[in-house]
Image (tube, helix red, strand yellow):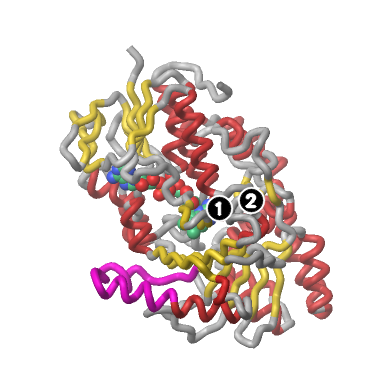
């Protein structure tokens, strides 16, 4: 008899766990509360426009341990087309002054030095920090399966990274920029306004540009929805099952051993192992009633800051509207979109570079801004509908500022709020990427196993501050590596 693994959640972590579980011969079932797989990694169609909610960049599009996972899980195959943008983002302040971030560090360095020759040394220092981060190589094994040699082996190659971590691991972007001490007002203002005003880790900023520079963080044509569907295809090809509209309410535990789950409709599903990739707080404090926590877990869930949720306004435009940059950020202060005063402005994603996102000659454009959960949690009925209508109006005015005369071509407007995300994925307070990577937690992770609870594992974005697709898929893989170890079975990853 094959052992049964039940996986809660069919997001990227759940799909990854499901694929490796089926690959390794387990009786595999993913229970997904929504009627579609992907979790945060999703998109939806309106009148043949596809509006993407997630993918801009995927670390591991060309090499490394993440790349192996993307190939093993069918996220990347011979047919996938990877687009490496030259511009990461184009940023405007309220007076339409422009600042560009290029993905190629040489090019960005030249651009910055040209803008601020007085800061040449400082710019070079910052860009060199980014270049060093190219050496960062994620571990392929979970911490529990690494031996001291795995650490010793990487030390020589990773030394520059370890130095970076030591120097900047506990700094926010603001502290890092202060240390660099730019003289040029324009660079200072843009960098501080973009990254310096929140508790955002300096290492996050440095690594992000390092990955782009290596062309190892591309965009996959088609975006989030086909990406998740390719994983579902692989899961099913291997004999795994995904069941939709199945919401787990409780995890069954007997004598501190996970034995299965109970769905919200009362159905009981027995299992040899349970892996939860659902929202971390809900798993630990609700499905397991807070009975299996450590001080570390409790501290994290009580103290670590969450991502502020997003409002996404998607536009279907009956015209081809090209853009120089895939992301345009407008840092204007004092704006109001609906009831929100977006603290950090808004961003516009123009998908004209991906021909699958809209019918020929048309364009999908997405606008996003942060909107605190407290504005949404009690908004219901007519008030909620009216808020969405006001957002439509305000967002259209802003889009018109970016693309004059566009309004008459808009044929679809779709507003997704933090409530939409919570409704479809159960993510806590709309924190779409889990814990904010701050200076306090950037180098920390949460354990996949809970104290004293056997045959249960967690995987997904809540284990790594900053979340993202790579750690989600990687912890999915790790969960099956740990189960294989327990079952004294060789782990397979290449079926
Ligand atoms: C706007 C946006 C942009 C992003 N951009 C990027 C990017 O460019 N690159 C990148 O790497 N990452 C990006 N991310 C982050 C990335 O999408 C997430 O970190 C990742 O998808 C999380 O995967 P997960 O499987 O851990 O969690 P989730 O996606 O949250 O999956 C959890 C799944 O569990 C299901 N579930 C929850 N509760 C239950 C229950 N009780 N019973 C059954 N099922 C349940 C949910 O429906 C969901 O499908 C972005 C996210 C957003 C929202």
Visible residue check, residue 14: yes
Residue 124 falls left or right of residue 205: right
Q: Which element carries disc 2, helix, strand or loop?
A: strand
Tell me the tag on residue 55: 1
Task: Give residue 25's position: percent from left, percent from top.
Answer: 43, 18
Which part of the image, by quadrant, shows the N terminus?
A: top left
Q: Are marks 1 and 2 in contact (CB under 8 Å)?
A: yes
Residue 89, located in which quarter of the rendered image?
Answer: bottom right
Q: Residue at x 27, y 71 (%)?
A: 379
- Write the residue at 43% across / 31% down: 18
Q: Quadrant of the C terminus?
A: top right
Q: Residue at x 22, y 32 (%)?
A: 256
Tell me how far mark 1 sits from mark 2, CA to CA.
Answer: 7 Å
Neighbor class of circle 2 (other Cα within 10 Å; few <14, some 14-19, many 20+) is many
Instruction: Magenta stretch: give its range.
Output: 368-392
Q: Residues within 10 Å of mark 1 (few under 14, many from 20)?
A: many
Residue occupied by mark 2:
219
Front-most of residues 287 and 203: 287
């Amino acid at each position: 008899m094959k052992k049964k693994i039940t996986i809660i959640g069919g997001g990227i972590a759940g799909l990854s766990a499901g694929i490796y579980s089926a690959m390794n011969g387990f009786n595999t079932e993913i229970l997904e509360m929504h009627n579609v797989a992907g979790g945060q990694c999703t998109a939806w169609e309106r009148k043949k426009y596809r509006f993407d909610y997630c993918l801009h960049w995927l670390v591991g599009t060309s090499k490394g341990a993440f790349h192996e996972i993307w190939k093993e899980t069918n996220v990347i195959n011979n047919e996938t087309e990877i687009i490496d943008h030259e511009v990461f983002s184009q940023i405007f302040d309220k007076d339409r002054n422009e600042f560009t971030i290029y993905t190629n560090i040489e090019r960005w360095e030249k651009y910055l030095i040209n803008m601020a020759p007085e800061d040449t040394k400082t710019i070079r220092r910052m860009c060199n920090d980014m270049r060093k981060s190219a050496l960062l190589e994620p571990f392929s094994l979970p911490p529990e399966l690494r031996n001291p040699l795995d650490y010793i082996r990487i030390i020589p190659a990773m030394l520059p990274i370890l130095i970076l971590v030591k120097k900047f691991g506990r700094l926010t972007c603001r502290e890092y920029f202060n240390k660099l001490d730019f003289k040029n007002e324009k660079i200072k203002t843009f960098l501080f306004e973009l990254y310096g005003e929140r508790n955002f880790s300096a290492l996050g900023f440095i690594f992000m540009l390092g990955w782009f520079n290596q062309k190892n963080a591309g965009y996959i044509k088609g975006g989030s929805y086909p990406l998740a569907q390719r994983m579902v295809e692989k899961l099913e090809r291997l004999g795994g099952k995904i069941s939709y509209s199945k919401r787990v309410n409780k995890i069954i535990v007997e004598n501190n051993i996970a034995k299965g789950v109970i769905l919200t409709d009362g159905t009981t599903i027995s299992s040899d192992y349970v892996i939860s990739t659902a929202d971390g707080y809900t798993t630990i404090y609700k499905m397991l009633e807070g009975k299996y926590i450590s001080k570390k877990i409790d501290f994290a869930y009580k103290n670590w800051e969450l991502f502020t949720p997003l409002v996404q306004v998607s536009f279907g435009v009956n015209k081809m509207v090209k853009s120089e940059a895939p992301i345009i950020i407008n840092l204007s202060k004092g704006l109001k979109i609906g009831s929100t005063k977006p603290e950090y402005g808004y961003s516009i994603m123009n998908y004209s570079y991906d021909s699958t996102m809209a019918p020929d000659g048309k364009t999908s454009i997405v606008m996003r801004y942060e909107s605190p959960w407290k504005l949404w949690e009690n908004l219901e009925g007519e008030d909620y509908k009216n808020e969405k209508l006001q957002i439509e109006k305000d967002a259209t005015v802003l889009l018109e500022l970016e693309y004059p005369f566009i309004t008459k071509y808009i044929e679809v407007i779709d507003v997704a709020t933090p409530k939409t995300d919570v409704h479809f994925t159960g993510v806590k307070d709309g924190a779409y990427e889990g814990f904010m990577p701050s200076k306090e937690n950037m180098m920390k992770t949460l354990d996949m196993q809970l104290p004293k609870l056997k045959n249960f594992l967690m995987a997904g974005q809540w284990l790594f501050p900053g979340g993202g697709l790579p750690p989600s898929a990687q912890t999915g893989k790790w969960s099956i590596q740990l189960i294989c170890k327990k079952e004294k079975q060789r782990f397979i990853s290449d079926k």
